[in-house]
């Protein structure tokens, strides 16, 4: 026991001696001391930057995966099939739009920043989101509708069904369009503004669209967001989607 104690004391004395040796060395070499301090600061800043970057990326990932469970639950009317029934307020009087040129979205044109992506990046994004479409009942009807328009491949996930932001449509433009697709077209107008859907069926459908980025909870969404053109189209779609 005495031997162990003696060894411990010897080790303690050695550590103390080395401490004072280092202290004297740094006192005699101020540049080395400065370098050590700067090095420690640089390491600390690097660690802090890494933590902040990780938290930001993790937050964006969680935002992308927002679901009904973490969305707000304001009082909303429900349609007969239980999906969300959201509208832009009271319907406007029926209006004669005159000789308005009616066009649908060119399926060959990707929307937003997607137009600048490579085909590999687009394919990766489509693959990453594909599992959401397995969890929604709307996709089969929309997929079939795209086929009737001659659209296939990744274009189905990278563009809008109708250009409701800049074009005013009439009821004849939606003749023959399946009811489920009409419902999606109407809700697509909300999705384009970042609306986060309470209904998981709708949420899963739009999460399967590469262009969709949920950013606004239902309680925070303002119908004043819609332009006059969008309101006209939304009124029309609400009258059809009964």
Image (cartoon, grey):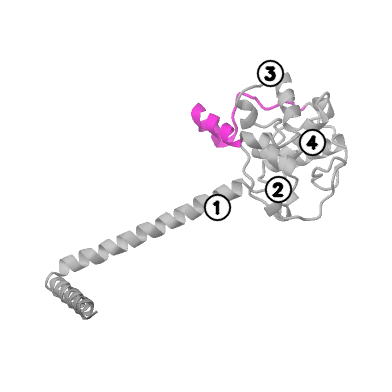
Residue that badge 2 annotates: 225
Residue that badge 3 annotates: 150
Question: Can residue 234 be seen?
Answer: yes
Counting from the top left corner in percent of width and height, residue 13 is at 17, 78
Q: Nearer the viewer, mark 3 or mark 2?
A: 3
Element class at badge 4:
helix
* Label 2, residues with CA under 10 Å away: few <14, some 14-19, many ≥20: few
What range is drawn magenta here? Answer: 100-129
Element class at badge 3:
loop
Q: CA distance from mark 3 to mark 2?
A: 32 Å
Residue that badge 1 annotates: 59
Element class at badge 2:
helix
Q: CA distance from mark 1 to mark 3?
A: 38 Å
Q: Which mark is residue 107?
A: none
Q: Nearer the viewer, mark 2 or mark 4?
A: 4
Residue that badge 4 annotates: 183
Q: Quadrant of residue 238?
A: top right
Q: Pick whichever of labels 1 and 3 is earlier in the sequence.
A: 1
């Amino acid at each position: 026991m005495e031997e162990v104690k003696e060894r411990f004391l010897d080790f303690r004395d050695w550590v103390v001696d080395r401490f004072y040796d280092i202290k004297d060395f740094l006192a005699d070499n101020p540049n080395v001391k400065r370098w050590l301090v700067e090095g420690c600061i640089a390491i600390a800043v690097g660690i802090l930057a890494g933590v902040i970057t990780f938290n930001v990326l993790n937050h964006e990932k969680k935002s992308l995966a927002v679901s009904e469970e973490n969305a707000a639950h304001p009082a909303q009317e429900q349609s007969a099939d239980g999906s969300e029934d959201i509208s832009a307020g009271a319907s406007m009087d029926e209006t004669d739009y005159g000789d308005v040129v009616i066009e649908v979205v060119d399926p060959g044109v990707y929307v937003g920043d997607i137009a600048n992506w490579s085909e590999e990046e687009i394919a990766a994004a489509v693959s990453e989101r594909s599992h959401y479409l397995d969890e929604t009942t709307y996709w089969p009807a929309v997929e079939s509708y795209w086929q009737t328009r001659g659209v296939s491949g990744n274009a189905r996930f990278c563009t809008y069904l109708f250009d409701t932001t800049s074009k005013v449509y009439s009821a004849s433009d939606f003749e023959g369009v399946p009811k489920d697709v009409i419902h999606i077209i109407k809700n697509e107008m909300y999705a384009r503004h970042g609306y986060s859907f309470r209904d998981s069926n709708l949420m899963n459908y739009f999460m399967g669209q590469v262009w969709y980025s949920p950013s606004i909870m239902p309680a925070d969404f303002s119908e004043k967001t819609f332009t006059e053109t969008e309101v006209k189209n939304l009124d029309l779609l609400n009258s059809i989607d009964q």
